[in-house]
Image: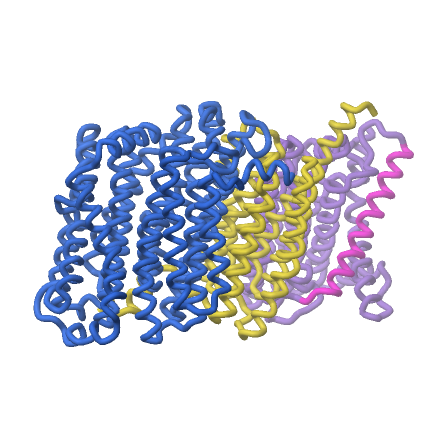
Chain colours: A yellow, B blue, C purple
Amino acid sequence: MNPAEHLASFGRISYDTAHLIGAVILMMSFGLLYQRRLTAVIRTYSLQAMVLALAAAWQALVQDAPHLYASALIALLFKGIAVPFALNWLVRRLGIHRTVETALGIGPTMIAGVGLVALSIVLVLPVTASSTAMTRENLAIAMSVVLLGLLMMITRRNAVTQVVGFMSLENGLILAAVGAKGMPLVVEISIAFSVLVAMALFGIFFFRIRERFDSLDIAYLETFRGERR
Amino acid sequence: MIGSLSTLLPLGVQNPLFWILGMPLFGSLFLACLPNWHHAVWVNVLISAATLAAAASLLVVRPAETLLFFIDDFNIYLVGLTAFVGFTTSLFSSAYIGRESRDRRLLPQHLRFYHSMYQAFLFTMLLALTANNIGVLWVAVEAATLTTVLMVSLYRTREAIEAAWKYFILCSVGIGLALFGTILVYLAAQPVMGDGVPAMAWTQMIKRAGAFQPELMSLAFVFLLVGYGTKVGLAPLHAWLPDAHAEGPTPISAVLSGLLLNVALYALLRFKMLIAANSHALQPGPLMIAMGCSSIFLASFMLYRRGDIKRLFAYSSIEHMGIITFAFGMGGTLANFAGLLHMTMHSLVKSAIFFAVGMITQAAGTKRIADIRGLTTSHPFLGWSFVIAVLAIAGLPPMGIFMSEFLVISSTFARNAWLAVPVMIGLLITFGALIWRLQGMAFGRPGQLVADSERRHQSTFVRAIGMIPLVAHLVLALVAGVYLPDALVAWFQAVGKLLG
Amino acid sequence: MMAFLFGIFHTWLVLVAAPLITGIVRLTKARLQGRQGASPLQPYRDLWRLLQKESVIAETASWLFRIAPYLVFVAVWLAATIMPTFTTDMILTPAADLIALVALLGTARFFTALAGLDAGTAFGGLGSSREMFVASIGEPAMLMVIFSLSLLTHTTSPANMIAYVLSGHIGIEVSAGLALASMVMVAIAENGRIPIDNPTTHLELTMIHEAMVLEYSGRHLALLEAAAMVRLLLFMTIISSLFFPWGIAFVDAGPGEVLLGLLAWFAKVSVLAMVLGFCESLVAKMRVFQIADFLGGALLLALLATIFLYVSEAV
């Protein structure tokens, strides 16, 4: 096998693997929306983070960018292991209701999810016509994961699930960042996000936020403060 | 790696950036270790003053740009403004905090945390303003969110925690989307700029922004507008803003309104400049005009129904950010000039109002507008200052805000007269709402609470210290309304041109 | 000429092999449950016994009730002739594609449901309504799977699909994996296997398929049972031939290759039968309300399979 051929076959493998990993991450996002039990949601999130670590490691290998291994390590240790552990502990400690309460049923959520995936593909494909298939696909999947995370935050009533939604949104962002070839500061961004996540968990524990405040609508505080009479 | 780092970071002692960024960062760490809050109050003021001095030295020494930091005509004035308001607010905070602590609303450990976070917050804002790297810019805005979340929840009441949580969640999502936009900008730039740090350095990017992939830039700008727009508090993404302003300590409301919103808008404007340099990408102007108009309208109507004094002025901030966004959306030298001037004036006057509000709520013991009456009778000096400040924010001449609003509207008339109509209507509605509310609070027979509480606690000295920032801001706003130095005008015009 | 012979052979092969496969599934389950279990040939004896018996028809039933079993059986059998088993060289293969297959299965289901309603009993109606509910999600999911496979292979004909897959044009294709997962879920639902339906129970709360055919007896029941067995074999063949087509013979293949194809097919469906028996022993039946979620998942996977084609290089 001459070098050019070798490179071509490696390109094929690198694409196929990235394709597979990206798809698995996206499926995990749907898994998060599909689950009805809090522990299952946390487990799915943990799996997603681990697969994300795999994606980062794979990109580190393909792009020959060693700093991405640090991102992979953060994803694996912090998001894949520490955060799920902390979440489970929180659920036990605060006695949070184990069933996921939904604002929108599972079925409609899934349909909305598919719609969002289609939307991100429709948005991303035309604007990346000149990029490689790997960049294009990675971006489309990352955007889908971001939007699905957003959907989860909107349709789940419980503070823990809301935070899980945010973290899965963040997984999408990290996926986009590691997939952007040669992007600097990815590690710093991973760390910044980890701090944010740690804060969220800390907030839940410290302030014992069991449910998300009835809505993110300002009307709620207004009634609370006697502005609506 | 380390060698290259030293060329990127402003490590030289002669470099003003070293002091501007290093002082608050070091101050934050130092204050975190300082056990006695009585000292911390003054250390906080000192550090802020030193930062202001360092920022002033930028006028003399302009540091060379690196791939991570730079100073140009645009951000130099925001750095100065941030350092100045940061300093005056620390002065006000010294009076405010003393009172809060005496009333046992804040415990010593909270105060230690508060002061440390105050400096950390200043650091993140200054970092965002001086960052040349769009990734660093993002990290700084994110860190600014974190520090303010912690401060909004300082009182630990149910409302404060709810406000902080809401602020945290909404702004986290916002900056998440902004990051996605940032990544898209990098992807658009990467084929032109090559891999690595230069493709994220703003000064490098702006030179070749015309060659970036226009479709990607358009998509990126939508994400950035929604993302950073959430932090600016543009309607309909403003839901966090009134609560966060209302529930945090008042000095924090002042810096949130006066500075943080500016920083978020600054980030957005940097990206607007990038996309405007690309003639094939989408026009950022109309989007910003639409969001600006919606903010002006929403806020102006919401003002009528406020019962809480801090929320009232929080909505007023949404309105003014709407005006500024509108002005920058219009573009052109004159509108940009007006936008810059309005940004400055709003920072000064709005923080002055929050200073006054802080003293009023402490004196009255309530934030309910209905319970605050006859301020001009019970506290003549504070009351009349408050009246002047509110008149200024409502846009009455001869204050600076009148002038900038006048410029916004006249420049809009020159370009597209129809667009000026909704803005004018919005301004008039706001004016009515503010005057109506002001009348109730400032005049009439003072309430029982107001009459006796203030003089009991604080020494004249501390009260005077608390008054200085309020007066200073108002005087500056008044001067700017009457006379702008030619040098300043020329400078604003240059920045206006830069903004395109 | 060979195509004609193979076609005839294939037609009878699926009919003859179907009870054996059902027998293997039952035997696997019995063994896993610690029972000795009946021989895999037992289904043949059952069918034979039913054919001997008198067919009792309800007084309220119309002519539809009588002809439905024949229509159902023929429709399923015809559908089974479309899907190649051991060779793609068959006379009927170019005549119809996978969409026709879905249509035939739909026809069979339609008549089963009508027959269930016809007798006017409560159970028949209940079964029919549940069956239609399952079909309303299952059928779009199956069409979606076929749609994405067609996009991937640029054809709807099963023989051409198999040829395309074997030609090695497809690398690691996520769409194919998703389509497979969706197909398996649809197959479970269509055949009324656990966890959707339990073919061995007559518990009124849960049964779907059995409720519809509750009124049948004798040769009519034999036909319906045979149709169910053929359908099970058909779905196993679809999965094995489309997703794992290795070993199948093409046009102009020698006798050795055809024999190999036959053995490979039989091995594949036997393995699938054992896997089915194994899985059915592991899971419990779902509540009826959860079926929508299950099939919704299948539909979702199928939709994603299609969507994924557009992000990947394949299309």
Relative to residue B192, is residue B17 depicted above or below? below
Q: Nearer the viewer, residue C24 or B409?
A: B409
Is residue A146 at least partly visible in the picture?
yes
Q: Position of residue B109 (x, y in %)?
A: 45, 70
Look at the image and say whether residue A40 sits in the magenta stretch. no
Question: Which of the 4 image quadrants contains residue C281?
Answer: bottom right
Q: Residue at x 51, y 31 (%)?
A: B188
Q: Position of residue B108 (x, y in %)?
A: 42, 72
Horizontal side of residue B428 vs B76, given as left or right? left
Q: Residue at x 56, y 64 (%)?
A: A36
Look at the image and say whether residue C276 sits in the magenta stretch. yes
As drawn, the residue found furthest toward the left would be B444
What is the total number of numbered labels drawn onto the structure image? 0
Relative to residue B105, is residue C143 depicted above or below? above
Is residue C140 at least partly visible in the picture?
no
Horizontal side of residue B440 vs B80, given as left or right? left
Q: Residue at x 78, y 55 (%)?
A: C273
Q: Nearer the viewer, residue B331 or C70?
A: B331
Q: Residue at x 63, y 53 (%)?
A: A49
Question: Which of the 4 image quadrants contains residue B1?
Answer: top right
Q: Position of residue B134 (x, y in %)?
A: 48, 38
Dominant SS of magenta comes to helix
Q: Position of residue B314 (x, y in %)?
A: 28, 56
Q: Nearer the viewer, residue C237 or B171?
A: B171
Q: Quadrant of the C terminus of chain A?
A: bottom left
Q: Quadrant of the N terminus of chain A?
A: top right
Residues rendered magenta in the picture:
C255-284
Q: Nearer the viewer, residue B384 or C59?
A: B384
Relative to residue B308, is residue C7 depicted above or below? above
